[in-house]
Image (cartoon, grey):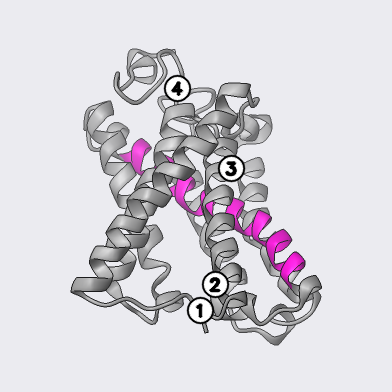
Amino acid sequence: MTAAANDHIPWLERRGEAFPFFCGEPVALSGGQWLCLLIAVAVGFGCLTAPLPVLTSGWGLTARALLFPGIPLLALRLVAGPYWTSLFRRLHLRDLGLMLGFAVLNLIVSGVVGLLVMQVFGANANAAFDVLADQDTQGKALFFLRTLPQLFGEELLTIVPFLAVLHFAHSRFGLSRTHSVLLAWLLSSILFGLLHLPSYHWNLLQCLLVIGTARLVLSLAYIRTKNIWVSTGAHVINDWVIFAVVLVGASQGILT
């Protein structure tokens, strides 16, 4: 393992744990292979968001939720071979605690930022909340189940570009590892926020400040552990709590 790969940010990362596909660990990916991965992520996101009738009703909704992460994972298997599993690590008890901890931290931080943005600039509700509130019991259950692959897909949508920027910033542009990590963390979070523009009626400040900030916190879970399962778990807990609040609010007539 190279010195750069073995380096870490003391206040954030665990010592001796390297990012996958960084500095040739466990295998080097070429610029073309990174481009293929980014295209696969874009195609997967397109399957999730394209207004195609076959993907917007019935089992099509489940299919698009599965295609969203499935296409990038297939591309990763093709370019990285057996090392595609480097994106995942075995979960330990402390990782479950980190999932909960980062989810709670994200709810607090994004809640405070959201209130400030709402008061100063105004904010729009996510249309998915209205869809969830209008579902019957079976529909609500299916909604929650479909969010599992979809939220995992959102992690791939962030982590793959994060790793790509990390690679290019350090290997091609000569930035230090720490600066490369911080740049990848920021740019991938901005991208995540911008991709939510249609969901929030193209409210740019809301997407950058609220969604982008939430993504910064969730990405810390990955940077800390190098394990996409941990950031996915934190993401699921965070969103399910929000969905539960929406359902309770709707049932009490608070959110209508």
| Front tag of 4 and 3 | 3
- For label 3, the SS is helix
Residue located beneath label 4 in the image: 18
Residue 164 shows up from this direction: no
Q: Which of 21 and 197 is in front in this view?
A: 197
Extreme residue toward the front, this view: 252
- In the picture of the structure, the residue carrying the numbered disc 2 is 249
Q: How far apart are marks 4 and 3 (CA)?
A: 21 Å
Report the amino acid beneath label 4: Ala
**Disc 1 crowd, CA 10 A, few/some/many (<14, 14-19, 20+):** some
Give the residue pinned by disc 1. Answer: 255
Q: Distance between the residues labelled 4 and 2?
A: 43 Å
Q: Is residue 217 left or right of residue 175?
A: right
* Quarter of the rendering occupied by the N terminus: top left
Taking the image as shown, residue 242 lies to the left or right of residue 73, namely: left
Task: State if disc 2 and disc 1 touch (CB < 8 Å).
Answer: yes
Nearer to us of marks 1 and 4 is 1
Residue 210 point in image, percent of width and height: 32, 61
> Mark 4 or mark 2: which comes first in sequence?
4
Nearest to the observer: residue 178 or residue 246:
246
Tell whether label 4 touches label 1 (CB within 8 Å).
Answer: no
Is the residue marked by circle 2 packed among few (<14), some (14-19), or many (20+) residues within 10 Å? Answer: some
Disc with the residue nearer the chain's start (4 vs 3): 4
Q: Name the residue at 59% across, 56% down.
A: 240
User: Disc 1 residue type?
Assistant: Leu
Q: What residue type is labelled 3?
A: Gly
Give whichever of discs 1 and 4 has the lower sequence position: 4
* Rendered view: 81 above or below 123: above
The location of residue 119, given as percent across then percent down, is 23, 72
Query: Mark 3 or mark 1: which is in front?
Result: 1
When asked about the image quadrant of residue 4, the answer is top left
- Answer whether residue 157 is magenta in the image: yes
